[in-house]
Amino acid sequence: MSTLVTGGTGFLGRRLVERLLEEGRQVTVLSRSTSSDLQARGVKFINTSLDDAAAVESACAGMETIFHVAARVGVWGPYDEFYRTNILGTRALLAGAKKHGVKRFIHTSTPSVIYNGLDHRGSDESLPLTTDCPSPYPLTKAIAESEVLAANGDELLTVALRPHLIWGVGDPHLVPRVLARAEAGKLRIIGSGQNRVDMVHVSNAVDAHLLAEQALKRADGRAAGRTYFITNDEPVVLWDWINQLITALGKPQVTKSISLGSASAIGGVCEMLWRLLRKSGEPPMTRFIAKELATDHWFNLDAAKRDLNYAPRISMAAGTAELIASYQNSSRTIS
């Protein structure tokens, strides 16, 4: 079975590619970079960016399944950059899938597509997509998700997954950023510090993608044209989990706090300065990040359990212990 994975050198994408290889699949990766070890294992690479519509459409030829994992991520940046990758790139893939007779399209979305500035406590897939968010990432991902689901039909079956805060050993983004800010003394609890969030271990996120593909193969068609939240189904008190992690690694516990109102105001000022001065990189705080770090974000997984047979294999406790051991071993190796 020929399978195309976009973003196959990223954190989630690479682990998905490795699982596909273990199943004996023929894998092609569309990405801007190449991995020599994956090439050695028989993976074909098409090096291009998602905004090259002709190259993206051509990459779909001969594929039976497309896993669209790649995206322009981040909380800050020009809207046009997010638009070109997240919307135009997805459109090019859908056009290529239809042109070349691809059967299945699994799209990696995000729970932030339902951003409304409020707490999410047991929220399900019935909530509307955001149209008003102070970050271009959720806005563009919401449009991309809607177009993927609208493309579902008899010839091309589509499904969208919304994994929340993917983490695990090898995570290059979430945990390293938290640890770096904690070590620099720049981490602050925003709000009460009691907000609960869902996260998802990278292995569970990979499981969900493969289960979604299997669901599209079934005759009942229940998953086709639908979207699903994917988490560990174990909401944690965010700041308790962060403190557990950093103290286990010998770093001081985060105790200083700031109100959500103050953090949002600081975020607004930072955004204004970054615009006026045309500064590169992301501001240290934004209104979107302030909300995300202070509010509840946990979701109802009934639909994923029912339609995809999804059940997290790696628990929060097991994954956290594995992550801590990985950092400790790495530290001993360096020393």
Image: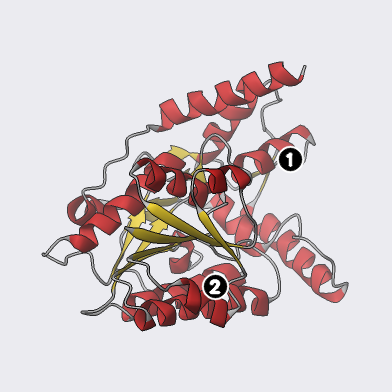
Query: From the image, which quarter does the N terminus lie in?
Result: bottom left
SS for callout 1: helix
Q: Is residue 179 visible?
A: yes
Instruction: Provide the residue designation for mark 1.
Output: 181
Find residue 314 and report its horizontal and vertical position in percent. 37, 33
Residue that appears at 11% across and 64% down: 220
Check disc 1 and give the amino acid type.
Answer: Arg
Disc 2: CA contacts within 10 A as few (<14), some (14-19) or many (>=20): many
Q: In which quarter of the image is residue 79?
A: bottom right
Residue that appears at 32% across and 39% down: 312
SS for callout 2: helix
Query: From the image, which quarter does the C terminus lie in?
Result: top right
Q: Foreground residue, 288 or 84?
A: 84
Whether 201 is drawn above or below 117: the answer is: above
Which residue is at the far left? 220
- Residue 118 is left or right of residue 23, and the answer is right
Find residue 286 and report its horizontal and vertical position in percent. 69, 61
Whether 154 is drawn above or below 41: the answer is: below
Check disc 2 and give the amino acid type.
Answer: Asn
Residue that appears at 70% across and 56% down: 262
Which residue is at the far right? 277
Q: Is residue 201 visible?
A: no
Residue that appears at 24% across and 80% down: 153
> How many numbered circles does the render carry?
2
Ranked by sequence position, the earlier of labels 2 and 1 is 2
Find residue 167 and report its horizontal and vertical position in percent. 51, 41
Whether 247 is drawn above or below 218: the answer is: above
Q: In which quarter of the image is residue 325?
A: top right
- Residue 27 is left or right of residue 177, and the answer is left
Instruction: Provide the residue designation for mark 2.
Output: 86
Find residue 166 and report its horizontal and vertical position in percent. 49, 46
